[in-house]
Image (cartoon, grey):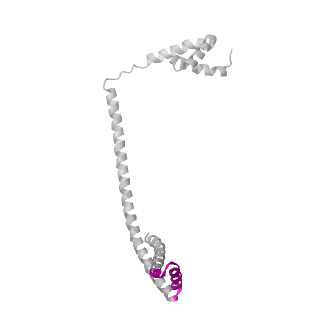
Amino acid sequence: MKQPNDHSHWDHALQDWLDGELNDAESAAFEAHLAGCGLCQRSLPEFEELDQALVESAPPLQLDANFDQALLARIDAIDESKRLEARRRLEQEWQEQMQSLSRNWRRTLAFVIPGIIGGIVLAVALMTWLDSSGITSNLVAQGAAELGGRSIDYLRVSITAVVGAAFGMLIAPWLARLAD
């Protein structure tokens, strides 16, 4: 006779076999075990009686013809209400994000333009000071000698624009932080 611990697998298999839940290979293995196991042979009628008693004690389920339609209508109603709620939330979030984007865009534009203008003003002031000190004249003269004599004005404007843009880029974030 087998040990009780070794037989626990077959106890579960007996109920599964009665319920028809074993595949062909498992069913064949259990039937081979059942042919030689006295414990399972004694338990089989008890399990069959228990199954029969459970079937008899449970009232038979009777569903009317409209059950499927009513169930599907309830499922559709739940899905529709959830879908409408999700759509409402998404539209509300979209509106909030658009308002935030609009505010941020206007604020950024309101500070970038004055920052760039301020940078250009500072650049012109700096270039005027550098011109009076002679530093720019030396730089422009060297560049003009390499590029040709007509490029002096272009070099002066380019240097002013680069310095102005650099100042503008420095001033714009400072103004934005100042506004917050």
**Name of the residue lying farthest toward the front:** 148
**Going 55% across and 14% down the picture, which residue do you hit?**
46
**Going 54% across and 20% down the picture, which residue do you hit?**
23
107 is higher (above) or lower (below) than 59? below
Q: Main secondary structure of the magenta part?
A: helix
Closer to the camera, 63 or 128?
A: 128
Question: Residue 171: horizontal and vertical position, in percent?
Answer: 46, 74
What are the residue bounds of the magenta stretch? 133-153
**Name of the residue lying farthest toward the bottom:** 132
Corner quadrant of residue 17: top right
Q: Is residue 47 visible?
A: yes
Closer to the camera, 115 or 179?
A: 115
Question: Residue 73: horizontal and vertical position, in percent?
Answer: 32, 33
Q: Is residue 122 visible?
A: no
115 is higher (above) or lower (below) than 129? above
Q: Is residue 3 left or right of residue 55?
A: right
**Going 38% across and 21% down the picture, which residue do you hit?**
61
Corner quadrant of residue 26: top right
**Going 35% across and 23% down the picture, which residue do you hit?**
63
155 is higher (above) or lower (below) than 21? below
Asked whether residue 125 is drawn in magenta, I would say no
Viewport quadrant of the N terminus: top right
Q: How many marks?
A: 0
**Name of the residue lying farthest toward the left:** 66
Question: Residue 15: horizontal and vertical position, in percent?
Answer: 54, 19
Viewport quadrant of the C terminus: bottom left
Asked whether residue 146 is drawn in magenta, I would say yes
Question: Residue 89: horizontal and vertical position, in percent?
Answer: 37, 50
